[in-house]
Image (tube, rainbow, N blue to C red):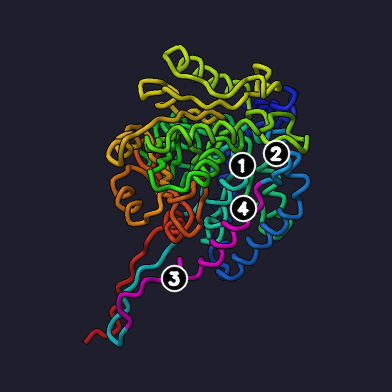
């Protein structure tokens, strides 16, 4: 049965967009068309697929003004930041540039007697279930390599960013990618789960909550379908005694509060060597106090509303509980009069926190960060690993050897030194523990969306 899903704008609470979902039968028919088209798409020359995908990205760039405005209405990001086109173009361009080498056969032997090699075959039909926080870049991570590798793709976007999938599909279809090769769809949770149980797809890529990832695994249990799951995060930063203090403050606070803290790899907890702790906290408060919370369409706004009131309520609850348990808030609420108790939420820095508090243990995904003092690397490593998640960590030190040694002991997918909150498309984007499994981007991103096929050809029979 079809139903209507709605995007409620965090800017003013209005119903910004609504769409009717596909029925189970309509979805099955869509799946059948995409699967039927996959063989022909994969038979096209690799160079042709690359060219068409690059043209799709170019067409999407032509829609920049429309996209930036729609993003502000849908999830609250200030228009001053111009959308996600920088990161999107960097990732798409890099993945297109390595496609030929990433998908090339691994030749073990090519002699008069034998050809032994491993090729990469497309998996078939890929389902991408995308999140609202970086709704374009997260799609591109999988969409570009999936199509280039010869797969067909069905995209189901988050309700909060209802129009994003439409814009991407429009651009790619305008560029010449057939509709039966890539389709944006609107599906209810019930129909999605039914399709997963039917093994309608050959690979599932999901970015979202831990609970959502568990539901996907349960729905697809026993189907043996491949999955890439990027789930929760509680990413730490560590400021060692030899760090550039000003650079650390600027980098970590931006990593904690940009996009209203709604970043998969945003910094949610900071550990500072005791010799720098007081100075770091003082500078961090000064940095955050200069932020401007407000309407995302106003040019001076640096933090817009959170994407939904219920997301802001989670963060408010964590902050209130922490204060009740002894944490001290350092940002004066009077600096952020736009905080309305709804989607507009003032940023906050908490000290006197500990790992018994939810704000230091559970994912916040909002504009709050806790800061703790540590006496040495050992204490910092123990604190950073004391977490159910493992996406990224950020180390601030002048010594790369030290950073590498610390990083080797951290339970995380990516180790940053003197930076944070960035996806390098040449490196695999991956996590561990409850952050999920699988990886995207890099050569390994192509490997995730293809399967190995071995050839052992004996040329001479004598």
Residue on which disc 1 sits: 135
Q: Is residue 303 above or below residue 377?
A: above
User: Sequence order check: which comes first, mark 3 or mark 1?
Assistant: 3
Q: Of helix, strand and loop, which mostly describes the magenta segment?
A: helix
Say which quarter of the image contains residue 443.
bottom left
**Mark 1 Cα-neighbour bin, 10 Å: few <14, some 14–19, many ≥20:** many
Q: 253 left or right of 185?
A: left
Residue on which disc 4 sits: 88
User: Sequence order check: which comes first, mark 1 or mark 4?
Assistant: 4
Image position, residue 309 (x, y; %): 63, 21
Residue on which disc 2 sits: 71
**Mark 2 Cα-neighbour bin, 10 Å: few <14, some 14–19, many ≥20:** many
Image position, residue 10 (x, y; %): 69, 26
**Mark 4 Cα-neighbour bin, 10 Å: few <14, some 14–19, many ≥20:** some
Q: 164 left or right of 317?
A: right
Which structural element holds mark 4? Answer: helix
Asked if marks 1 and 2 touch (Cβ < 8 Å), the reply is yes
**Mark 3 Cα-neighbour bin, 10 Å: few <14, some 14–19, many ≥20:** few
On-image quarter of the N terminus: top right
Asked if marks 3 and 1 touch (Cβ < 8 Å), the reply is no
Residue on which disc 3 sits: 104
Magenta highlight range: 84-110
Q: Nearer the viewer, residue 380 or 190?
A: 380
């Amino acid at each position: 049965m079809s139903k209507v899903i709605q995007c409620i704008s965090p800017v003013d609470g209005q119903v910004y967009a609504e769409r009717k979902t596909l029925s189970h039968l309509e979805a099955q028919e869509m799946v059948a068309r995409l699967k039927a088209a996959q063989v022909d798409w994969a038979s096209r020359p690799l160079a042709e697929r690359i060219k068409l995908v690059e043209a799709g990205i170019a067409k999407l760039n032509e829609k920049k003004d429309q996209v930036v405005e729609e993003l502000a209405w849908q999830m609250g990001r200030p228009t001053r930041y111009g959308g996600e086109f920088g990161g999107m173009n960097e990732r798409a361009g890099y993945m297109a540039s390595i496609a030929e080498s990433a998908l090339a056969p691994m030749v073990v032997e090519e002699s008069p007697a034998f050809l032994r090699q491993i090729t990469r075959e497309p998996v078939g039909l890929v389902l991408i279930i995308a999140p609202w926080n970086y709704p374009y870049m997260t799609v591109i991570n999988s969409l570009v390599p999936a199509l280039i590798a010869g797969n067909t793709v069905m995209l189901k976007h988050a309700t909060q960013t209802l129009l994003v999938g439409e814009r991407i599909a429009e651009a790619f279809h305008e560029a010449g990618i057939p509709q039966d090769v890539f389709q944006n769809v609107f599906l209810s949770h019930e129909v999605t789960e039914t399709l997963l149980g039917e093994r309608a797809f050959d690979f599932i890529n999901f970015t979202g909550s831990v609970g959502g990832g568990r539901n996907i695994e349960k729905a697809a249990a026993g189907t043996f379908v491949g999955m890439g799951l990027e789930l929760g995060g509680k990413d730490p930063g560590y400021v060692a005694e030899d760090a550039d203090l000003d650079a650390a403050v600027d980098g970590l606070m931006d990593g904690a509060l940009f996009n209203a803290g709604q970043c998969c790899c945003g910094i949610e907890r900071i550990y500072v060597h005791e010799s720098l702790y007081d100075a770091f906290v003082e500078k961090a408060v000064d940095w955050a106090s200069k932020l401007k919370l407000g309407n995302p369409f106003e040019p001076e706004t640096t933090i817009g509303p959170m994407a939904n009131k219920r997301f802001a309520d989670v963060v408010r609850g964590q902050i209130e509980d922490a204060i009740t348990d002894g944490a001290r808030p350092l940002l004066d609420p009077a600096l952020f009069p736009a905080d309305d108790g709804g989607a507009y939420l003032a940023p906050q820095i908490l000290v006197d926190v500990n790992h018994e508090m939810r704000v230091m243990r559970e994912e916040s995904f909002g504009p709050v960060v806790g800061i703790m003092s540590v006496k040495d690397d050992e204490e910092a490593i123990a604190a950073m690993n004391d977490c159910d998640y493992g996406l990224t960590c950020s180390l601030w030190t002048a010594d790369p050897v030290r950073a590498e040694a610390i990083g080797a002991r951290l339970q995380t997918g990516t180790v940053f030194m003197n930076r944070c909150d960035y996806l390098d498309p040449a490196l695999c984007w991956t996590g561990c523990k409850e952050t999920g499994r699988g990886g995207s981007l890099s050569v390994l991103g192509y490997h995730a969306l293809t399967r190995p096929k071995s050839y052992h050809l004996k040329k001479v029979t004598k």
